[in-house]
Amino acid sequence: MTTSSIPSQHWTAQLDAALPAANIPTLLMMLVHLTGNRRWLSERYQCTHIRGIDDHDSGGLATDVQQEVRDAARDAVLAWKAGRPAALPAPELAQLLDMLQRSVGEAVPASYGPMVGAWLGLDPEFQIDQKEQYRALKAFHVVVIGAGVAGLCASIRLHGAGIAHTVIEKNAEVGGTWYENRYPGAGVDTPNHIYSYSFAKADWTRYFALREEIQAYFVEVSHRFGVRPHIRFNTKVDSAVYDEESMAWTVRVTGADGRTEALRANVVISAVGLLSVPKMPDLEGLDTFAGPCFHSARWPEGLDVRGKRVAIIGNGASAMQIVPAIAPDVAQLTVFQRSKQWAAPFERFQKPVPAAARFLLKELPFYQQWYRQRLAWIFNDRIHASLQIDPEWPHPERAINRRNDKHREFFIDYVKAELGDKQELLGDVLPNYPPFGKRMLMDNGWFRTATRDNVRIVNEGIDKIEPNAVVTKDGQRIEADILVVCTGFDAVNLLSSFTLLGRGGRNVREHWDAEGAQAYLGVATPDFPNFFMLAGPNTALGHGGSVVALLETQVQYVMSLLKAALQDYGQHFEIEVRRDIHDAYNGRVQDAHAKMIWTHKGMSNWYRNSKGRVVAPTPFRNDDYWHMTRNSGLADYVISGGAAKPPGGGRERVAGEAS
């Protein structure tokens, strides 16, 4: 990362104006890169522990030390701007680990070193332009289903490898969930500086972006990396059927004009994700409601809620964003909830990134990259240990261990403070299960909104829907003009948006009926050769982290398999995960889940299917999963066919076996 332009007076003035607002721990990491001087990692500059999810801009350092860092950063940046290259652009992995630990003020697992290197762009396997590394033959073709966050990432990596591919997208634009979910208040509850690709920086206007800015980012990225010619918009996948003889898939699609077409693909990558099929409740009379009635993911364009009586069924993530956003405008807002939700303080909700911080993040070398690393640590794995069930803990009705109980105390105090003089509402909003037992939400003003005179929370179950009212099981009849269904998505029945037939015509629904969806690393499943999933079973981040980073990890894993198969077999191959490897992995997944909060007695959440099996979240830390994908390869698969004949003249071998 070098530059040769002499810094202008205007640019230098902007730098001087921005540095007082800089994040000192991040400046320190930048100084290590630019100067190569390890003194910036000495005890004098050791940052203190980050409490909560604050940026901890001072690093806990004395005022004079902070100014020393700013002054040194100014000199180093101006020298870099004038053309002096970074002295240490690519630290060793051990040094990267030390840098992160010094930055966040606490011990970090050694396994984080390689992952940090990858997210800083230092791992060649994660680089975009890899055409020289792939044997991408002209006849080889990949079909990607979906152009959301996962499918767009896959397309960028395939394009960078020179692999011919087609992305099938049912909508008129990229973005997936961000294109579809247009309800008031929609936004991220993960900082958008990490809810973005590591290879595509952005100049964010908010710390937690709203839907419009997030969607604009993914559209811009699709243009920036030149993948839009690969995408067929307004086209729906009807089915994907595997043919064993040709070792290829037939993907049938329907375009906007209603015409169907069959595409041939050597490999199919599903990027439809967990949260793509809205789930509607089975309520008597739901289809008879006279006013607007819709799922939150299908919010009507131009809907005017001002002065209306609005009823909302459900109180999950979307409801927690919608309710505070529309409450000031509606006449009456009634929320029908089955269970209550924990929500954490959200101090930076709706807060803009100051101009000074935007300048630093956009202009300074290594600054945004290390700002991302600190955020990733804060929001990733810090709470993972607290989600393990302590069998000796004497109060399982309220928590799963001592630390979880401390979290509960903190959240209860927060809720009480938000309710103010309306403490009588505590029973309506305070959950009766351990914190993090369901996905932890961020408080967009939910608890304060519950205290408004025009807002009511109803805990009784719904008996039926009438043309202009919701009737509860205890006989209450609550009239409404608009009915919003916030009951989430069909996350346990993965790949339900199209028909998928694998080896021998086996339907994936039948394949998963007995136990529920499962896949090796959440990516591959037996009997479905040359087929990979992104955001598949047991990959949701229930304990925290950036789903975008997870998807980059999965895409890199699939790319590594394709690279190895293309190099060894040419364009004609069949790759299928070994059943023993698959089964052993999923056994480890469920064994780990049995010790975690999501299987705690009395818990119910969308993470589990009707049989009680956890199918959505991963039980593993982000770094553990990252290393699993890096350490797994063709040895975990059965490979057939190909231009390169297996030793001994046979047609099939298990990759990694001795010949």
Image (tube, helix red, strand yellow):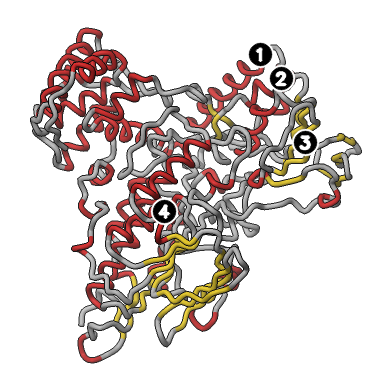
Element assignment for label 3: strand
Mark 4 or mark 2: which comes first in sequence?
4
Nearer to us of marks 4 and 2 is 4
Query: Mark 1 sits on what residue?
Result: 420
Nearer to us of marks 3 and 4 is 4
Quote the CA–CA distance across marks 3 and 1: 25 Å
Q: Are marks 4 and 2 in contact (CB under 8 Å)?
A: no
> Which label sits on residue 311?
3
Q: Position of residue 425 (x, y in %)?
A: 73, 22
Tell me the amino acid under the disc marked 3. Answer: Ala
Query: Mark 4 sits on what residue?
Result: 152
Q: Position of residue 156 (x, y in %)?
A: 35, 55
Q: Position of residue 553 (x, y in %)?
A: 35, 52
Element assignment for label 4: helix
Give the quarter of the figure containing the N terminus: top left
Q: Are marks 3 and 1 in contact (CB under 8 Å)?
A: no
Q: Is residue 505 above or below residue 563?
A: below
Residue drawn at point x = 49 percent, y = 31 percent: 402
Tell me the amino acid under the disc marked 1. Answer: Gly
Quote the CA–CA distance across marks 4 and 2: 42 Å
Query: Mark 2 sits on what residue?
Result: 451
